[in-house]
Image (cartoon, rainbow, N blue to C red):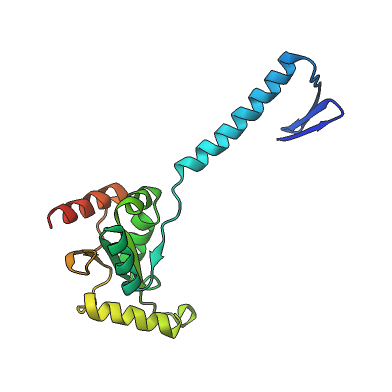
Amino acid sequence: MTIIINAGELLTYGSGVKALKRFNPANPTSAMRFLFLCLAALLSFSGARAQTPAAVTWNNDLVAALQQAKAANKPVLAVFSGSDWCKPCIMLKQEVFDQPEFQRYAQDKLVLARFDFLRSKKNKLPADQTKRNEQAAAQLNKEGSFPLVVLLSPEGKVLAKTGYRPGGPAAYDAHLSQLLTNR
């Protein structure tokens, strides 16, 4: 819908029909109706934005994630994945980590770190990132499991290890909460 106010006229274009109405700013009813519609439109747009969480930040450096966790006194959720070859890794990302419900949960409770081990040459990571991924894996994923989700204390102590679990973000959030309370 396009609204144009020009020389006291309100033009509304909608569904292919052009309607012309006189807008008289001196008429309190007309002015109030117009202001009410503008306010309603503004509130509907701001309400939609408020429900969408800000995108969570994923660290790609274990040392930086632990420093952030210590400063915030939050555990670290470190994810080891192969996003271009590991089907359960892809499912975990799409079904859980990319969902707004998980992002709201993580924003308040976790510091996130992701270490992606890509196989395709077209997806090759820079050498410094590959080195950080390998260092994190040497420390936390010696078995080479994919996907592997490791919960760490802010001091870097391993609290729990898990992987992909079906059920979506609510079930996964509950699973993570249970793992954190059992420690």
On the image, the x and y values in percent for residue 51 come to: 45, 41
Residue 158 to residue 175: above or below = below
Q: Residue at x 31, y 62 (%)?
A: 71
- Toward which corner of the image does residue 8 lie, by quadrant? top right
Q: Is residue 79 left or right of residue 157?
A: right
Residue sitting nearer the eye, 55 or 67: 67
On the image, the x and y values in percent for residue 110 come to: 30, 57
Residue 153 to residue 103: above or below = below
Residue sitting nearer the eye, 68 or 82: 68
Residue sitting nearer the eye, 32 or 90: 32
In the displayed image of the protein, which residue is found farthest to the front?
71
Q: Is residue 123 left or right of residue 165?
A: right
The C terminus: image quadrant: bottom left
Q: Residue at x 37, y 49 (%)?
A: 104
Q: Is residue 164 left or right of residue 49?
A: left
The N terminus: image quadrant: top right
Examine the rendering and report whether any part of residue 141 can be seen.
no
Q: Residue at x 17, y 51 (%)?
A: 178
- Toward which corner of the image does residue 60 lie, by quadrant? bottom left
Residue 42 to residue 124: above or below = above
